[in-house]
Image: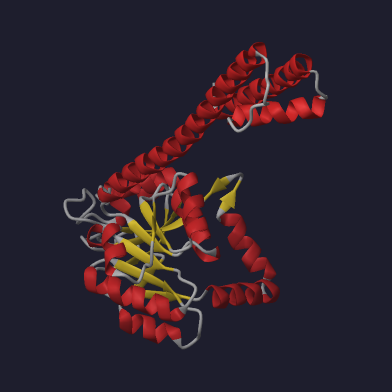
């Protein structure tokens, strides 16, 4: 029996006790129903006794009072159980959450789950990425927890909060806070705590890009600028934009752009593009290659291009195909 059913049962018993008590006092003391109802309520609370009450009425009063005390005690017990159970559930959930976060490694940290951050969360879930969200708004934090998302309630500009997010073991960080000043502090703090991870920061003001990069961001993105450029491109060259949308989604098969870094001990190191037959074996489309420690990007690379450790392959493929090439590149 759950709490709601138990409360309904208590209310039902209380009404029955009132009815029995009201009718009983009315008959035993020969008084009106309103007066007997009043006496019943007072007796349940232990506050009233009619002077000159006959012995049978006194016995009846003791029975009414005993049942009233029992109902009251049971009701208090239920409320205590509900409160304690709620606290225990919250405590247990928090402990499990902290335990999962403490085990994170090579994960991503998202600072801020606002409108932009919400989209990032959706992409992370779709890509099955390991990530944790730092959110200062308690209501947003609770919603994340209810959705089964790892989250920390706190300020992403504080070292203690970033440390709880296992920033020293993180692969990357996205700072998507609502103010440029907060993003700058978060990036600066994060970069000091982990000098190797990749950091992307949201830039709201036009002047924020350079400041965020000086603070340690590898890349800055302005959602407003991207949205504006996309709308301008759509109106000027609608056919081109539509074509790009079509080739990334053909017959309900969604294709993603992915950058794959060739790691040490990969089986494709030292082999030409044609030898590993990427297109034939995995079905991927290799759009470009960025050679290790070189800024120039080789678009539409030659089949004879030799692959080396640290090279980045820009590919267009499905999610399953991306997983296969990552195994070849020893990235997973």
Tell me the quadrant of the picture where the N terminus can be found.
top right
- Compared to residue 8, the image places residue 280 above or below, namely below
- Compared to residue 164, the image places residue 55 above or below, namely above
What is the image's colouring?
secondary structure
Q: Position of residue 212 (x, y in %)?
A: 37, 81
Q: Residue at x 53, y 23 (%)?
A: 70
Quadrant for residue 135, please give it: bottom left
Q: Residue at x 16, y 51 (%)?
A: 265
Observer-nearest residue: 16 or 6?
16
Looking at the image, the residue that sits furthest to the bottom is 207
Quadrant for residue 192, please give it: bottom left
Looking at the image, the residue that sits furthest to the left is 265
Observer-nearest residue: 22 or 239?
22
Residue 38 seen in the figure: yes
Observer-nearest residue: 19 or 277?
19
Residue 281 seen in the figure: no
- Compared to residue 98, the image places residue 3 above or below, namely above
Quadrant for residue 216, please give it: bottom left
Is residue 59 shown left or right of residue 108? right
Q: Residue at x 27, y 68 (%)?
A: 159
Q: Position of residue 277 (x, y in %)?
A: 34, 48
Is residue 49 shown left or right of residue 3? right
Q: Residue at x 70, y 23 (%)?
A: 18
Looking at the image, the residue that sits furthest to the top is 56
Q: Position of residue 233 (x, y in %)?
A: 63, 74
Looking at the image, the residue that sits furthest to the right is 32
Is residue 64 shown left or right of residue 152? right
Count of labels in the image: 0
Q: Position of residue 13 (x, y in %)?
A: 64, 20
């Amino acid at each position: 029996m759950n709490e709601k059913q138990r409360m309904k049962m208590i209310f039902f018993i209380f009404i029955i006790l009132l009815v029995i008590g009201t009718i009983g006092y009315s008959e035993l003391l020969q008084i009106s129903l309103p007066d007997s109802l009043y006496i019943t309520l007072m007796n349940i609370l232990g506050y009233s006794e009619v002077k000159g009450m006959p012995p049978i009425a006194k016995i009846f009063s003791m029975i009414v009072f005993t049942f009233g005390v029992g109902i009251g005690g049971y009701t208090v017990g239920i409320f205590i159980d509900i409160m304690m159970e709620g606290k225990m559930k919250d405590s247990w959930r928090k402990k499990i959450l902290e335990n999962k976060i403490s085990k994170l490694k090579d994960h991503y940290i998202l600072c801020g789950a606002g409108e932009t951050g919400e989209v990032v969360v959706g992409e992370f879930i779709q890509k099955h990425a390991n990530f944790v969200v730092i959110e200062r708004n308690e209501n947003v934090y609770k919603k994340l927890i209810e959705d089964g998302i790892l989250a920390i309630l706190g300020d992403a500009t504080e070292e203690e909060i970033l440390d709880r997010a296992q920033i020293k073991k993180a692969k990357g960080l996205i700072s998507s806070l609502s103010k440029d000043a907060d993003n700058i502090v978060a990036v600066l703090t994060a970069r000091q705590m982990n000098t190797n991870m990749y950091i992307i920061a949201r830039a709201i003001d036009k002047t924020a890009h350079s400041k965020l990069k000086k603070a340690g961001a590898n890349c800055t993105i302005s959602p407003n600028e991207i949205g504006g450029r996309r709308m301008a491109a759509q109106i000027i060259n609608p056919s081109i934009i539509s074509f790009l949308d079509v080739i990334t989604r053909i017959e309900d098969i969604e294709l993603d752009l992915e950058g794959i870094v060739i790691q040490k001990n990969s089986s494709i190191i030292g082999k030409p593009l044609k030898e590993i037959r990427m297109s034939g074996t995995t079905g991927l489309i290799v759009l470009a290659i960025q050679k290790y420690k070189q800024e120039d990007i080789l678009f539409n690379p030659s089949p004879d291009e030799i692959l080396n450790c640290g090279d980045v392959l820009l590919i267009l493929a499905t999610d399953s195909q991306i997983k296969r090439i990552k195994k070849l590149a020893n990235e997973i």
